[in-house]
Amino acid sequence: MEELRKSDPEIYDLIGKEERYEFDSVRLIPSENYASAAVLEATGSILTNKYSEGYPGRRYYEGQRYIDTLESLVIDRAKALFGAEHANVQPYSGSPANLAVYFGLVKPGDTIMGMALPMGGHLTHGWNVSITGTFWRSVQYNVDRETHRIDYDAVRDLARRERPRMIVCGATAYPRKIDFKAFGEIAKEVGALLLADIAHIAGLIVGGQHPSPVPYADAVTTTTHKTLRGPRGAMILCRGEHADAIDKAVFPGLQGGPHNHTTAAIGVALKEAATPEFRDYAAQIVRNAKALAEELLARGFSLVSGGTDNHLILVDLTSKKVIGKKGAKALDAAGIVCNYNTVPYDPRKPFSPSGLRLGTPAVTSRGMREPEMKQIAKWMDEAIAQAGDEAALKRISGEVAEMCHHFPAPGLSIR
Ligand SMILES: *Cc1c(COP(=O)(O)O)cnc(C)c1O
């Protein structure tokens, strides 16, 4: 980044510091990852110069001879990888992708039914502060109070009572497999459309570690930057019968020109995700999450639902007598980055909840395995026990950085 260094030292310096931080720390934010150098190159390419409102063969701008080929190639890769009838690769990110699906398939004021945010659902699944809980009538389902799992009978009862136009499944903080087939049956019974939002688990699905919703859902949305390890962006996959409505909702309904540099980088990520190495990666993400969960349990941490079968762990810190925010801050000072999070039926307020959300996609991208997960759990235990002790946290952060130096991260120039 020589040109950037010369022309804008302030920005250059901040990017350099962030890179150092991403190299020296254990990153356990489950929605984060390390995109490959190839993905970053496509993202930083001259494609950022182009305008191309419309779709391949149907543009409002001339000059599309290469862009049309590019977008068609990426659409074909998306359809092939997920086995979908139609793909739209233009949504700017996960939230606008969900908005486009509602806008395309649900009339304003009609009912949508998603999982409540404090239970692990996403803001855009109809939570009241989101546009999705305002423009549409929203009803929300919870997880079971005892098992912390989705209670499919309760979901069916609510759907029968409320007769939603669309049911939304998928989550942002749910450590267990989601039964997309069951959701498909419930939607069918009540005459609802089904949207599956696989933003967090798309990489696990293509890697064979989680069942796919594609056979059961009318539309599937996903971000491309989480377990899929691509650029920041999103895609909508849908049945052929909804293709027109979805495409029109994205453009001209919601967006202007697509971000072609992102489209290209999504294509690169989809090609990477179709390899045997990526399948191994997805399997290791889950093994690492299980190893981390086991060691945390052995050290007296309490986990929502008692464990995990995906990439994500929700810790209830109540048993450690530390609140989520304080725990997350102490861990960051110790070089372990995660976020505080509500736990189901959290007695505390959302801006200062009881839990922590952890995930293994990023550390797995660095080649860390079960022994490192054990070590990370040990450091977490020490950091939480000494949450106010700056010297202790600093000592741990040194040990964390030492370990990290043995695991080069994809895309970083520091080795
Ligand atoms: C991350 C996420 C989104 C939103 O993605 P953004 O790119 O942050 O807008 C949507 N749905 C779920 C389930 C997510 O986890």
Image (cartoon, rainbow, N blue to C red):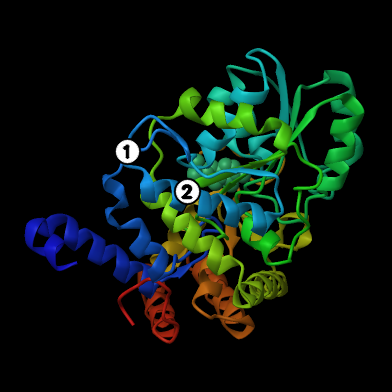
Q: Quadrant of residue 408?
A: bottom left
Position of residue 188 measured from the top left corner of the image (x, y, whole percent): 88, 32
Which one is in front, 122 or 365? 365
The answer to whether the residue bearing label 1 lies less than 8 angstroms from the nearest atom of ligand 1 is no
Position of residue 386 measured from the top left corner of the image (x, y, whole percent): 48, 68
* Mark 1 neighbour density, 10 Å: few (under 14) some (14–19) many (20 or more): some
SS class, disc 2: helix
Q: Report the residue at 55% width, 80% height from top.
A: 368
Mark 2: which amino acid?
Glu
Position of residue 56 measured from the top left corner of the image (x, y, whole percent): 48, 41
Position of residue 44 measured from the top left corner of the image (x, y, whole percent): 30, 58
Q: Report the residue at 61% width, 85% height from top.
A: 371
- Relative to 183, residue 380 above or below: below
Q: Report the residue at 72% width, 74% height from top.
A: 298
Q: Which residue is mark 1?
A: 51
Query: Dots 1 and 2: beta carbons under 8 Å?
Result: no
Q: Quadrant of residue 111?
A: top right
Quarter of the image that includes the N terminus: bottom left
Q: Is residue 76 left or right of residue 287?
A: left
Q: Is residue 105 left or right of residue 372?
A: right
Q: Which residue is mark 2?
A: 71
Q: Report the residue at 92% width, 37% height from top.
A: 153
